[in-house]
């Protein structure tokens, strides 16, 4: 009969209309209540009505991998040895890998010797040009630049606000661990330490030289990992992620073993060379 | 000459590419030579014989579908211009690649529009961006730039307004990267080349009159004509560029007799940003996020086509590992999800176009939201996914789709990823498709508006190089996932959606069937993901280099995207042992080429149908204008 298809469609819209209210009843108007888990339920499989998120009264929290405008990691203020120090070594890989070329870095030079120091003198990101691709964070070998979660960056004047300098870009390491605990944990596993790569190297070198002089026996790397992990792991990530002690179980720890093997060999070579010269 | 007729058991229309080339060589001795540059394939045809050879390729050899026609400027690499054509058989199989070379000073290559109408827009683009003339082209004028624009911007020696350096990465960024805005340093006009005799105050844009002239009209937009004994006015109507029904800044110039459309001319380029020029300044890796911005509805598919093309090139090198199985499975899953997104979007907005304002589209894109949530949790962004890499992916699936509260009023969610996917694929998406069908398939208004409107015959669809649902809606069962398979599609079980009628309704039904087929594919992907859990997503077991060197050669990577065949023609040349920046980066954009038959499809229908016909092609201006 002519018009049946039309009527069916209209019934569907009516059903959607009614179901939205039924959903509200079912969830007891919890969407107006600041409880943590009802939002996930409202957006789950069983919900049938039409749900809107009433921005800015409600905001959908972004997932950990969300990326928006990079920031630079600096060491926490309460860090025993490196407080306030940049993680960035101004190697320039982020500037090279940036597709719209919005990163500008002035490499630092030692005022006395004139040789480059592993710290940027200045760092700029033009956020008008940034396309939020996340390459800088992905390819940074020092985990020093990360994508932020703060997307509310509107300003009244682009000329004065949209070139972020080093001061504006810098955020403490603890902030990164806060917004992306799982990822920070995964990075730690790859790096082998919660510390900055160089700092860890430094510490190991110091420990090795003081303990053993020129002997080629390597330091125990696993111990460094677990001890520093235990003191620095935020509760959330420690609960969510697998224990780092499971050697060989995860791909990261396999990588770790290889890396340590390489490092050990390099150290041996170096020691041999030093012995030959000395 | 070797005796090629020795084994004619197989008819020449279905013979292998090599046999086809041998046949051409015997037919046109002297006009054809093999392209023997390292990493190149196909034949180089003498321009004087190009049209004849093309007729043989299409008529006798059965390569009836001209997928891509594009130009390359080999400045400093032989100093010639080259047109590259990729012809396929709609029965399936690989490409017959043929090329024609001409000099850079006064480039001209005979037009192939008389053989394949699908060459029309692509040759206009080559004229516009490279300055190659095509004698025999019926309407050779600029297509993306405006008439009166000076120069041809894709030529290697042309420099854009805020030109900094030939290739990225720019030297000024590091180690002495003192920031400046490009407009401060390069005030507009300072580094643009104008002809010496030009008066900037009297710059003329003649594109308007050119558009009307090509419709057979003078500069006047109205003329009196006599038809059926009545005196009527044939009127020119401009639809767009600023009109919501054109899905962006797209313009159609129609001549109407009463309410009936007598001719239609698409005008585009309002969103042109010279994507390909940017792509040639970029390194290979830089281009992946730029491909997201083409068809921004289905960025995963865009990524896929590009990484396939570059992986083809990389496989020419000595050290190459193909992507792992898990990587391929994840890629296919993402691409199929984005196909669902694309079709839900396309059907919804097509409904908008024919008058069902926003109720259907909002129902459909509710499910799209969930898929985008998933993309966001996996790739980091909802639409600009930037997910695929050469030989791998940005990252494996996270354990949980978990958000972390950061701003005030944040609402957090926490799902198990595989459970979320399973529920989405098995319950929610099928439910949405059922609702969609209930709402539309038998709806009398939809039927009235779309049946027998905007008809495109199968022959025309092939001849005009239509792709995707537009081609399959005309009864041509051509889907690259089956015809020229890539990734893990050969082992997946799914059907090609085909409808015979060739009208708007047929295209709608093709999309609905494809939605269901995508769900079918996704259901097969889920167990594959479970089985490969823990496998590396990287071919080499570790992330790829940030500046890979790509060996010399050419590659054409094409995928079946939601809107049709998306192809990337990438050439690696210059430098020793490969390059880190593509010499040529061309996008065969389905949204662009699918507009070639728009004029033909619209003739004889009412003005109100035109919007629907355009909607049923399903274009995205980011891809059309590039």
Image (cartoon, rainbow, N blue to C red):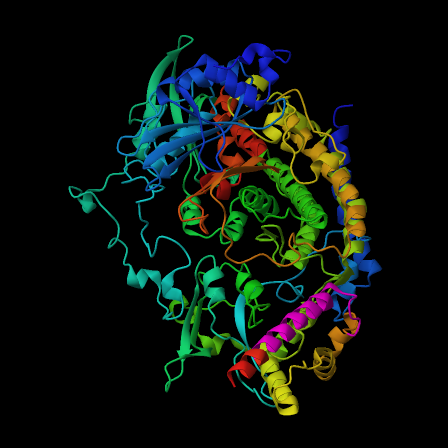
Q: Which of B445 and B179 is in front in this view?
A: B179
Q: Which residue is drawn at 43% across and 39% down?
A: B241
**Which stretch did the figure color magenta?**
A245-270
Q: Residue furthest front?
A: A276
Q: Is residue B66 left or right of residue B321?
A: left
**Closer to us: B292 or B429:** B292
Residue B163, by quadrant, is bottom left
Extreme residue toward the top, this view:
B229
Q: Is residue B33 left or right of residue A274?
A: left
- The residue under the point 58% across, 15% down is B13
Please give the name of the residue rendered at 66% of the width and 40% of the height, measured from the top-left corner: B487
User: How many numbered markers are drawn?
Assistant: 0
Image point 45% across, 46% down: which residue?
B582
Q: Horizontal and vertical percent for residue A146?
A: 57, 69
The C terminus of chain B appears in which quarter of the rendering?
Answer: top left
> Is A258 colored magenta in this rendering?
yes
- Left or right relative to A88: residue B229: left
Say if residue B404 shows up in the picture.
no
Visible residue check, residue B270: yes
- Counting from the top left corner in percent of width and height, residue A246 is at 80, 71
> In the displayed image of the protein, which residue is found farthest to the right?
A26
Location of residue A19 in the rendering, given as x and y in whole percent from the top left corner: 79, 50
A91 vs B165, nearest the viewer: A91
- Considering only vertical position in the picture, is B349 above or below B418? above
């Amino acid at each position: 009969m002519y018009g049946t298809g039309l009527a069916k469609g209209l019934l569907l819209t009516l059903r959607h209309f009614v179901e939205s209210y039924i959903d509200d009843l079912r969830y007891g108007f919890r969407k107006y209540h600041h409880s943590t888990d009802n939002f996930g339920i409202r957006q789950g499989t069983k919900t049938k009505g039409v749900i809107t998120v009433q921005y800015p009264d409600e905001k959908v929290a972004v997932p950990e991998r969300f990326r928006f405008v990079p920031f630079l990691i600096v060491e926490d203020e309460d860090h025993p040895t490196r407080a306030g120090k940049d993680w960035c070594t101004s190697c320039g890989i982020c500037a090279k890998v940036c597709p719209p070329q919005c990163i500008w870095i002035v490499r630092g030079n030692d005022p006395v010797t004139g040789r480059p120091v592993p710290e940027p003198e200045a760092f700029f990101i033009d956020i008008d040009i940034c396309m939020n691709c996340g390459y800088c964070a992905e390819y940074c070998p020092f985990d020093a630049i990360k994508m932020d979660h703060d997307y509310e960056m509107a300003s009244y004047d682009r000329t004065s606000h949209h070139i972020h300098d080093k001061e504006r870009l810098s955020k403490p390491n603890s902030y990164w661990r806060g917004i992306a605990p799982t990822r920070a944990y995964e990075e730690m596993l790859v790096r082998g330490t919660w510390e900055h790569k160089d700092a860890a190297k430094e510490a190991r070198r110091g420990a090795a030289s003081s303990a053993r002089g020129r002997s080629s026996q390597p330091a125990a790397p696993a111990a460094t990992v677990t001890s520093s992990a235990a003191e620095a792991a935020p509760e959330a990530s420690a609960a969510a992620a697998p224990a780092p002690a499971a050697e060989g179980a995860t791909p990261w720890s396999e990588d770790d073993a290889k890396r340590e093997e390489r490092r050990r060999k390099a150290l041996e070579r170096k020691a041999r060379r030093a012995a030959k010269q000395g | 000459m070797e005796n090629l007729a020795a084994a004619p058991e197989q008819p020449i229309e279905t013979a292998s590419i090599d046999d086809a080339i041998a046949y051409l060589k015997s037919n046109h001795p002297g006009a054809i030579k093999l392209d023997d540059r390292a990493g190149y394939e196909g034949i180089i045809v003498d321009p004087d014989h190009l049209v004849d050879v093309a007729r043989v390729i299409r008529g006798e050899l059965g390569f009836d579908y001209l997928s891509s026609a594009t130009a390359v400027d080999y400045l400093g690499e032989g100093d010639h211009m080259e047109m590259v054509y990729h012809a396929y058989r709609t029965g399936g199989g690989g490409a017959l690649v043929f090329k024609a070379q001409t000099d850079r000073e006064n480039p001209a290559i005979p037009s192939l529009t008389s053989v394949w109408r699908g060459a029309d827009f692509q040759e206009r683009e080559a004229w516009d961006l490279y300055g190659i003339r095509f004698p025999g082209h019926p309407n050779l004028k600029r297509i993306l730039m405006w008439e009166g624009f000076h120069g041809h911007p894709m030529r290697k020696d042309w420099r854009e307004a805020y030109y900094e350096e030939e290739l990225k990465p720019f030297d000024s960024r590091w180690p002495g990267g003192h920031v400046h805005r490009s407009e401060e340093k390069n005030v507009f006009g300072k580094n643009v080349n104008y002809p010496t005799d030009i008066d900037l105050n009297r710059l003329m844009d003649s594109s308007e009159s050119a558009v009307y002239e090509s419709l057979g009209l003078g500069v006047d937009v109205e003329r009196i004509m006599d038809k059926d004994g009545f005196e009527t006015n044939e009127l020119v109507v401009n639809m767009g560029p600023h009109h919501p029904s054109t899905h962006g800044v797209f313009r159609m110039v129609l001549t109407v007799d009463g309410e009936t459309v007598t001719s239609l001319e698409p005008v585009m380029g309002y969103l042109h940003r010279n994507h390909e020029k940017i792509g040639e300044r970029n390194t290979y890796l830089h281009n992946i996020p730029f491909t997201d911005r083409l068809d921004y509805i289905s960025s995963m598919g865009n990524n896929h086509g590009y990484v396939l093309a570059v992986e083809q090139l990389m496989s020419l090198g000595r050290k190459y590992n193909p992507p792992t199985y898990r990587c391929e499975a994840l890629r296919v899953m993402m691409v199929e999800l984005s196909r669902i997104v694309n079709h839900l979007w396309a059907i919804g907005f097509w409904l908008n176009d024919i008058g069902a304002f926003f109720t259907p589209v909002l129902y459909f894109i509710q499910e799209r939201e969930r898929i985008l949530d998933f993309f966001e949790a996996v790739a980091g962004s909802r639409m600009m996914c930037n997910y695929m890499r050469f030989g791998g992916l940005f990252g494996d699936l996270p354990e949980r789709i978990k958000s972390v509260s950061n701003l005030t009023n944040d609402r957090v969610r926490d799902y198990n990823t595989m459970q979320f996917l399973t529920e989405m694929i098995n319950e929610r998406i099928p439910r949405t498709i059922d609702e969609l069908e209930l709402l539309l398939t038998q709806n009398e208004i939809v039927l009235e508006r779309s049946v027998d409107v905007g008809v495109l015959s199968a022959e025309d669809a092939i001849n005009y190089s239509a792709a995707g649902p537009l081609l399959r809606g005309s009864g041509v069962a051509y889907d690259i996932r089956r015809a020229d398979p890539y990734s893990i599609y050969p082992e997946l079980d799914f059907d090609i959606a085909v409808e015979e009628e060739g009208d708007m309704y047929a295209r709608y039904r093709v999309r609905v069937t494809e939605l269901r087929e995508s769900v079918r594919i996704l259901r097969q992907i889920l167990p594959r993901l479970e089985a490969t859990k823990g496998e590396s997503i990287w071919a080499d077991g570790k992330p790829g280099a940030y500046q890979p060197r790509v060996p010399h050669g050419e590659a054409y990577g094409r995928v079946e995207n939601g809107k049709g065949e998306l192809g990337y023609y990438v050439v690696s040349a210059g430098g020793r042992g490969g390059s880190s920046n593509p010499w040529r980066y061309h996008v065969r954009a389905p949204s662009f080429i699918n507009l070639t038959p728009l004029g033909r499809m619209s003739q004889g229908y009412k003005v109100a149908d035109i919007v629907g016909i355009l909607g049923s092609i399903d274009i995205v201006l980011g891809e059309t204008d590039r």
